[in-house]
Amino acid sequence: MTRILAIETSCDETAAAVIADGRHILSNVVASQIDLHRRYGGVFPEVASRQHVLSINPVVEQALVEARLGWADLDAVAVTEGPGLAGSLLVGVNAAKGIAFMRGLPLVAVNHLEGHVYSNWLEPVVRGGDGASTSPSPSVVHFQFPVLVLIVSGGHTELVLMEDHGRYRRLGGTLDDAAGEAFDKAARLLGLPYPGGPMVQRAAQGGDPARFSLPRALTTQAEHRYNFSFSGLKTAVLRLVREQQAVLQDVAWPEGYVEGVHKETRRQEEKERRGVEDADDGRRKVQVIRDIAASLQAAVADVLVSKTLLAAADCGARQVCICGGVAANGELRRQLAERMTLPYSIPPIWLCTDNAAMIGAAAHYRFMAGLRAGWNLDVRARLPLASW
Ligand code: KG4
Ligand code: ZN
């Protein structure tokens, strides 16, 4: 059995986890910095690094306590070396080196994108498609290679054919914005708070996905068959916001929105119940935003699922894995369930966004293959997913 302590600090989550055999989550601690960055409308790199410095020790300690393990029970320490924010990565790498050095443990460096891929090897993974269960399954997931992987996060949108553990063939990726970036930028245009993806999803509830027809870059031309482009969507949303300016100008997203209650809607519903006349106007404004958000979500999900189906068929993939923060999106999950013909797996929502459990899962396979990082391990802000 391997027990690996994993550390992840590539962006704005300080995370540590203990993973057994690359699959069982003994603990998974994530300290989110969302509240800190909201006032800046996005991740403020220096603020992120400083917060990692404050959180890293308590988070690591808690991961061990929750796993009910001591240092002597560990087989290795794993850490994300990149890609990500250099200042944030440094905190995790230094912490991992310090622990490995003092405790005499091997150090394993993990690519963040590979971590997302391996989030699909953790229990419990959600499976779907031909003949497979669509509910969280505690049973062992046996992957049959080649596996077609779609990575969709804030910085990446990649289609990769995984031929075996640690063997990746990149098929394509985004030519401009990542899928998560498209959500984040559109959210800003709609006046929705950070983080954009979950806020767009929430705004889309009760929205009409067919009201606005947004562009879908679905070219099947050989050169761009497996590539994505989302920048046109951002421009289209900007155009819609301008067109709807007269309706939208007074919409101020109320504070309670972030906590999940849309006060504006509630107030309008209240007025409506009481028969107040101007209820209609406010509702119309909110509805426009809901409809744009729903149309955006539908367009992004459509493109992601269509290209994944295309690539999987072309490459003779036996299974499909979806991962990364955008895999948390409800509309994407709905379209996958509806349209996937191959067996596929997608992590539960709490394992889609950044966490250290996935780093521990990926580290297990590297560790078993004898891969070790040296004391000269440095961070790599730009690091493509590569075979080992
Ligand atoms: O994987 P992740 O946590 O961090 C990176 O490695 O980038 O992904 C973050 C991205 C953000 O762009 C965020 O807006 C998006 O994932 N995201 C979502 C949802 N939850 C997170 N996008 C759409 N719908 C969601 N529910
Ligand atoms: Zn990530």
Image (cartoon, rainbow, N blue to C red):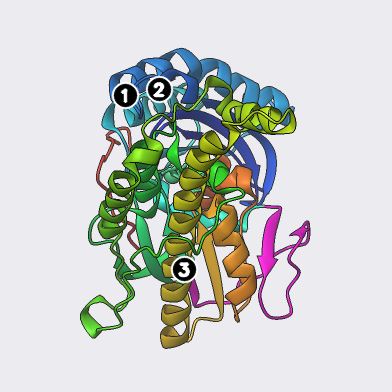
Q: Mark 3 and mark 1: span between their CA atoms?
A: 31 Å
Magenta stretch: give its range. 123-149
Label 2 CB sits under 8 Å from any ligand 1 atom: no
User: Dot 3 corresponds to which residue?
Assistant: 302
The circle on residue 37 is: 2
Crowding at dot 1, Cα within 10 Å, few <14 / some 14-19 / many 20+, comes out as: some
Compared with 54, 375 (above or below) is below
Answer yes or no: do the residues labelled 2 and 1 have beta carbons within 8 Å? yes
Query: Tag 3's secondary structure?
Result: helix
Label 3 beta carbon within 8 A of ligand 1? no
Is residue 127 on the magenta stretch?
yes
Report, in whole angstroms, how far the alpha carbon at label 2 lies from the one at label 3. Answer: 30 Å
**Mark 3 vs 1, N-terminal side:** 1
Frontmost of labels 2 and 3 is: 3
Q: Specify few, some or many for label 3: CA neighbours under 10 Å numbering under 14, 14-19, or 20 or more.
A: many
For the point 63% across and 26% down, which residue is it? 267
Residue 311 locus on image (x, y percent):
41, 79
Three-letter amino acid code of the residue under disc 1: Phe
Q: Amino acid at mark 3?
A: Asp
Q: Is mark 1 within 8 Å of ligand 1?
A: no
Specify the label residue 24 is tagged with: none
